[in-house]
Image (tube, rainbow, N blue to C red):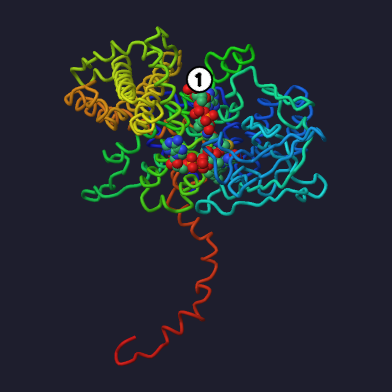
Amino acid sequence: MEGVDHLAHERNKAQFDVAVMKAVWAGSRDAYELFHRFSRLVANDPEMFIPAIKAQATEEQQKQWLPLANKMKIIGSYTQTELGHGSNVRGLETTATFDPKTDEFVLNSPTLTATKWWPGGLGKIATHALAHARLIIDDKDYGVHGFLVQLRSLDDHLTLPGITIGDIGMKYGSGAYNTMDNGSLIFDHVRIPRNQMLMRLSQVTREGKYVPSNVPRQLSYGTMVYVRQKIVFDASIALSRAVCISTRYSAVRRQFGSHNGSPETQVIDYKTQQARLFPLLASAYAIRFVSEWLNSFYKDLLQRLEAKDFSTLPEAHACTAGLKSITTSVAADGIEECRKLCGGHGYLTSSGLPELSAVYIPACTYEGDNVVMLLQVARYLMKTISQLKSGNKPVGTTAYLGRAEQLMQYHSDVLRAEDWLKPNVVVEAFEARAARMSMACAQNLSKFNNPEDGFQELSADLVEAATAHCQLIIVSKFIEKLQQDIPGKGVKEQLGVLRSIYALFLLHKHIGDFLSTDCITPKQGYLANEQLRSLYSQVRPNAIALVDAFNYTDHFLSSVLGRYDGNVYPKLYEEAWKDPLNDTSIPDGFHEYVQPMLKQPLHHGRL
Ligand SMILES: CCCCC/C=C\C/C=C\C/C=C\C/C=C\C/C=C\CCCCC(=O)SCCNC(=O)CCNC(=O)[C@H](O)C(C)(C)COP(=O)(O)OP(=O)(O)OC[C@H]1O[C@@H](n2cnc3c(N)ncnc32)[C@H](O)[C@@H]1OP(=O)(O)O
Ligand SMILES: Cc1cc2nc3c(=O)[nH]c(=O)nc-3n(C[C@H](O)[C@H](O)[C@H](O)COP(=O)(O)OP(=O)(O)OC[C@H]3O[C@@H](n4cnc5c(N)ncnc54)[C@H](O)[C@@H]3O)c2cc1C
């Protein structure tokens, strides 16, 4: 019935102050930003073009181009990936050859695989590209640099001479990403003025002299670092959106369990449903908090870079790359699990879940393929370990590696299930697991004469060690979050339950790591799972309130299953009738194709 809250009985069970939890979840961001970060999907994405200009252009170039880009007088595309190269930026083929006679760069796509391919906005709408190309001076290749290239006339939007542009076609399913005109671009000796090479980091003089960057060359990758830390925030939003839908529906849906006419059982009360759903609820909060930390870490990096302090740049790269990888994988897999948690109705477009999945899953690929990103983390971990011998004391997220010797001797002293509720007990187990996995890789790497060969041979183990490291970061930041002052009745207690669910779920899921590195005994692993089951019972009465705290409107969720009022069945039926297929009783084509078959006489008793 309209106006009735079918989930009121669930909301009345809440044991904490939902208004405070809403504030904790929103953190420093407001609802507008949450919505804005998705609205851009259906518009052109200035998410990268503008930050790239800020990161790579001189002050003078910024003064020229930023006002135009900010006011949408030009529409830019971050044009890096090519048909033949995406992960391997140093393998890009597009060239920008300096012509000293005319003081210009000539941009060219020397091969088919040099075709720019994927950049958002490039296919139909962008007027300018921030094109990444190999700088060539006097036949010498100085590597990939950024160049601003106009693609289309600002009068009639037609492509300019030497520019061939197209859209790369439909993408995965009918997802919303098909509203993004990811495009292709071929340069045929296109000339641009020298001052359209972004020259904040390195320069080319009028005489054609290359002035190399006096800062780490990786700062030219700065836009990717910036977007990766934003994508961690996106992961928390995408996952929480799916969890909100599937939690509310799990409380509405009843199946089996009726006795003597009693109502059937709410599927949220099945232990299997809880064991699949509640870790995702906890993960949404965990990712939200680590994204907050990562954003502050990134802002600190920017301040340091202003002061030419590059000390945290390697760690910032490792953290943004690793957390982007881990959180997008958890969110993408979690959205699919939420669809399955909703049974058949989860497969309906009106559930909001297929669309969410279709639009979200490329996050595991864009801004750095998730495996390639974890290999970057592994490289950082191996380098950190290699420097231990020289007395280099790791700090920050790798500080635990400075205690590697001690952690190699660690054995959990858990005796009872409730011992696993102690944050220090959990952190020690996760530190020991991560340290031992990385140390084992380092040990094996040392057996190879050629470190690169070893890295390749051991890359699967290195990815697992990098995963363990990133999961430790997320667990640690969840614990740190709860060391802050958090007001409100029961709020910190509930977050404590989610923190323990998140950690113990990971321990249970990766029990093989913890046992094979001899960090815990099978018995201690069993006790962790015991505790997990108890935690699910504790979170159960608060589940609806915990997803209400995400503060998503029905409009934002766009899901009949995730409606705030839980009035699912009438709305499911109503939504179905909006489908154009239901505009007529007899389907198109029936009379032409089906009816003749039905009318066909029987022959010898056979159709
Ligand atoms: C209707 C429904 C709608 C609702 C939707 C609901 C929910 C959806 C939720 C979210 C969606 C919403 C918003 C999201 C939308 C869009 C998201 C935003 C943008 C998406 C578009 C994506 C854009 C792109 O993909 S741009 C292209 C990205 N490309 C990449 O990332 C390339 C990856 N490759 C690299 O980064 C590099 O090639 C490399 C792998 C790092 C290797 O680089 P290389 O130079 O070869 O370096 P090497 O490995 O040799 O290492 C040398 C040295 O350098 C250090 N290093 C490397 N990189 C960095 C760096 N970035 N910073 C600092 N240091 C770096 C490395 O560690 C080595 O150091 P050392 O020598 O070991 O010390
Ligand atoms: C929706 C979407 C939007 C995008 N938007 C943009 C954009 O706006 N601008 C832009 O420039 N690009 C964009 N891209 C491109 C994107 O950045 C690349 O696709 C991404 O970086 C992955 O690179 P790739 O396609 O070369 O994958 P590949 O690297 O070819 O990956 C293929 C497989 O090879 C594996 N692999 C690769 N290298 C290694 C290695 N060294 N060791 C082990 N395994 C390896 C990967 O793990 C993966 O399994 C977009 C892509 C998508 C899907």
- Mark 1 burial class by Cα count in 10 Å: few <14, some 14-19, many 20+: few
In percent of width and height, residue 463 lies at 37, 31
In percent of width and height, residue 479 lies at 39, 18
In this rendering, position of residue 123 left or right of residue 20: right
The answer to whether residue 379 shows anywhere in this view is yes
User: Which quadrant does the C terminus fall into?
Assistant: bottom left
The answer to whether residue 26 shows anywhere in this view is no
Q: Which residue is more in the foreground, 407 or 579?
A: 407
Is 467 above or below relative to 562?
above
Task: Kindly indicate the quadrant of the structure image that contains residue 56.
Answer: top right
For the image, the number of numbered tags is 1
In percent of width and height, residue 406 lies at 28, 10
Task: Kindly indicate the quadrant of the structure image that contains residue 170.
Answer: bottom right
Residue shown at 70% from the left, 25% from the top: 210
Residue shown at 66% from the left, 21% from the top: 212
In percent of width and height, residue 250 lies at 36, 43
In this rendering, position of residue 196 left or right of residue 552: right
In this rendering, position of residue 64 left or right of residue 467: right
Task: Kindly indicate the quadrant of the structure image that contains residue 141.
Answer: top right
Q: Is mark 1 within 8 Å of ligand 1?
A: yes
Is 109 above or below relative to 533?
below
Residue that lies at the very extreme toward the top in this rendered image: 391
Q: Which residue is more in the foreground, 349 or 521?
A: 521
Residue that lies at the very extreme toward the front in this rendered image: 139
Q: What residue is pinned by disc 1?
A: 314
Instruction: Give amino acid for label 1.
Output: Pro
